[in-house]
Image (tube, rainbow, N blue to C red):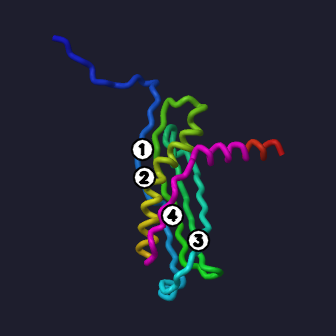
Amino acid sequence: MNEQQPNIPPSNQPIFNVERLYIKDISFENPNAPEVYSRQSDPTVDFNLGTAVSQKGEDRYEVTLQVNARVKEGEDVLFLVDVTYAGLFRIRNLPPEHLSPTLGIECPHIIFPYVRRVVSDLVTEGGFKPMVLDPINFAALYHQAKAREAQEGQG
């Protein structure tokens, strides 16, 4: 009788797993409610996005994506939203030259749709029209950051 072995990947094959996605920190401020709801203007948005990586074991990494937005009408703040969303990733047997781009591009790309949903929900629950975040080119942000690091290293 011919028994087949289960499909077990070789021990040196690259492994990439999303272990968990979670809100790490969240804040919504609506300092001028309810007066703010009667305004009919075109507000300005100050938007910032950042990522951070921390190793949590031999092959585990926490990648955080932080989004903050300050929406103003003139000098009056309509609302502020801050969300830090994280992912815990298990990455094993990845060539060293691929680890940094994976953590800086692929992991934030996985986290971003969750951040977008949370931001939209918070803003809507705050009494405003949904704030839908545009797609982010994490590869471009990663390469800009690496170029900036290289330039600062030369200075």
| In front of the other: 38 or 23 | 38
| In front of the other: 101 or 73 | 73
Residue named by callout 4: 83
Amino acid at dot 2: Leu
- Secondary structure at numbered mark 4: strand
- Decide: marks 3, 1 in contact (CB < 8 A)? no
Q: Quadrant of residue 154?
A: top right
Local crowd at mark 4 within 10 Å, few (<14), some, or many (≥20)?
many
Residue named by callout 3: 70
Residue named by callout 2: 21
In the image, the segment drawn in magenta is 127-148
Q: At x 65% / y 81%, what residue is drawn?
A: 75
Find residue 93 and report its horizontal and vertical position in percent.
50, 29
Label placed on residue 28: none
Q: Please state which of the two labelled residues, at mark 4 or mark 3, is closer to the viewer.
A: 3
Q: At x 50% / y 45%, what residue is drawn?
A: 107
Residue named by callout 1: 18
